[in-house]
Image: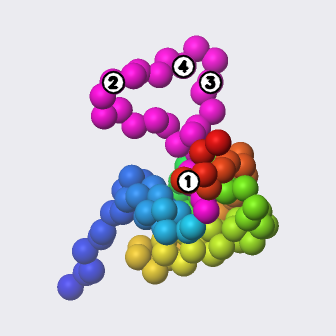
Amino acid sequence: MATPEVEISKSVLLDIAATTLEGIEGTEIAAASLKVGEVIRNQPGARRPRALRVTREGQDVTVDLGLNVDYGRNLLAVSQQAQRAVRENIELMTGLKVRAVNVAVQGVCLPKGQAS
């Protein structure tokens, strides 16, 4: 008897990565940069595009993400923590192989609760 195929959607991979990043203190997923001519709809409940992209080729996954990091944090250490956590969670939860987690620190912000 053949093992049934299970398809893991791209949105599931995005959700795993996003949920993982929420657990890393001092970081948030940056807003995606807008392309020329792109319109943002300010509708109630509409989600802003985020700098998080997952590319899948067969059983291999590549994650590209943009982070905002709290001021005072070690950018290299936080980036490496994000890479490691996203890789481990996607591989653990899906069985897919993560080829790369590319992190771009797009901004530095004041920690929440320290608004000027």
Residue 51 visible in rendering: yes
Mark 1 or mark 2, which is nearer the start of the sequence? 2
Q: Nearer the viewer, residue 76 or 116?
A: 116
Q: Is residue 113 placed above or below 78 in the rendered structure? A: above
* C-alpha distance separating marks 3 and 1: 28 Å
Look at the numbered discs 3 and 2 and tell me whether their residues touch, using CB distance below 8 Å: no
Where residue 100 sits: x, y (%)?
Answer: 67, 65
How busy is the neighbourhood of tag 3: few (under 14 within 10 Å), some, or many (20 plus)?
few
How busy is the neighbourhood of tag 2: few (under 14 within 10 Å), some, or many (20 plus)?
few
* C-alpha distance separating marks 4 and 3: 5 Å
Amino acid under disc 2: Gln
Residue 43, picture quadrant: top left
Residue furthest bottom in the image? 1
Residue furthest top in the image? 37
Q: Is residue 68 placed above or below 60 in the rendered structure? A: above
Q: Residue at x 40, y 37 (%)?
A: 47
Q: Nearer the viewer, residue 43 or 51?
A: 43
* C-alpha distance separating marks 2 and 1: 25 Å
Foreground label between 4 and 2: 2
Report the residue marked by disc 3. 35
Amino acid under disc 4: Glu
Element type at mark 3? loop
Mark 1 or mark 3, which is nearer the start of the sequence? 3
Residue furthest front in the image? 116
